[in-house]
Amino acid sequence: MLSPATSQVRRVLVRWTPEERATYTASLGLTGWPAAPAVRRFVDDTLADAELPPPWFAKRDFEGRLFFSNPNTAESSWVHPLDGTLRELAHICIGCLGFEEKERDTRVHAMLSQWTSEVHAEVAKWYAVPDKKGKKKTYYCHSQTQEVSWERPEKLASRAYDLKLRALGKLLDSSYVRGLMQAGSAPVAGCFATGDDGDDDEDDDEDEDEQDESEEAWDEDREEGAKGQGPETETCVQEVGQDALLKVESPSGAVLAELGFEEGDDLGLQGSPLGSATPQPITPSSSRKLS
């Protein structure tokens, strides 16, 4: 089998299909969790909102297989660049569904505060270095790992941070959470305190049948309004200005208001040394060593 790096590529507009999203969520290994159907639905919703961190974009090879490419480093991968973030959000969803609304909201706001603090702390470890060859270009170096990148740290991190923000917004929306629990046959709040008695095979089969039916209807609804969603494409990659701030662009303004933001607000990171967020670790790395 050809690797994505050596496959011939069709340069076309690339979007996730419902089948590809389903395959990805199945790869997260959620089988066996009481709320697995609900969490898969949550991850699918989150994935549909996910924009790739620059300079990554999605491609298809001549066999139609989706992969991800970084033109700056000539790297290609079958793995989504934000895979780690998506997996983290899946486990957060598992935990949040086990609490009543008030406790869930408290924990979600606490996570937002924690993530913001981590962003500020990590950004402080990066510093800008002017190009010594006389070119009007700056690169960035991590003071601890010595990692070097031409990309501004906020460009690498903005997608992951925004993805987390949007996901938290979903978990603050009580009607959305109720929909998850109903459509995904998730257990009622508090169920995670007890174990599985191992005698629910028939119930599990019924739940899976209900899930399949609800997912078919849900995918049809999703496709109706799916324009512009899915991974970024080669023709849609946008450069972010050096002075750009992270912006809240989620359509769920009411939900974001619960997080303390308004549509179009920056996320309070302008006091950071580089004006925004820190690079989010991804696989493969989006940085490169400079000569």
Image (spheres, grey):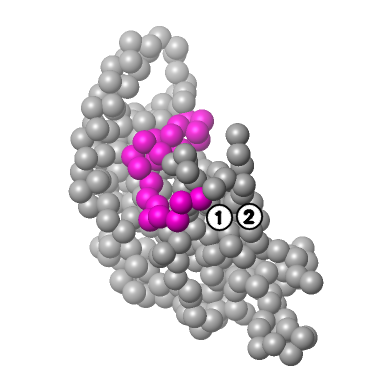
Where residue 172 appears, x then y in whole percent?
Answer: 33, 52
Say which residue label 1 marks: 69
**Three-letter code, disc 2:** Glu
The x, y position of residue 71, in whole percent, is 58, 62
**Is residue 220 at all visible to an observer of this figure?**
yes
Question: Within the magenta stretch, is there residue 134?
Answer: no
Residue type, label 1: Ser
Q: Residue at x 67, y 82 (%)?
A: 138
Point out residue 114 in the picture as x, y percentages from the top left corner. Answer: 54, 59
Q: Is residue 286 above or below residue 45?
A: below
3D distance between C-alphas at marks 2 and 1: 6 Å
Task: Assign a secondary structure to mark 1.
Answer: strand
Q: Which contiguous range is marked in magenta?
A: 9-30
- Answer few, some or many: residues within 10 Å of disc 1's Cα (few below 14, many 20 plus, some between 14 and 19): many
Residue 15 falls inside the magenta stretch: yes
Look at the picture and state if 126 lies above or below 192. below
In the picture, the disc for residue 75 is: 2
Work out whether residue 116 or residue 29 is closer to the camera in this orientation and state it: 29
Residue 89 in view: no
Label 2 neighbour load within 10 Å: few <14, some 14-19, many 20+: some
In what quadrant of the picture does the C terminus appear? bottom right
Cβ atoms at labels 2 and 1 below 8 Å apart = yes
At horizontal 36% and vertical 31% (from top left) the residue drawn is 37
Q: Is residue 132 left or right of residue 103?
A: right
Closest to the observer: 200 or 149? 149
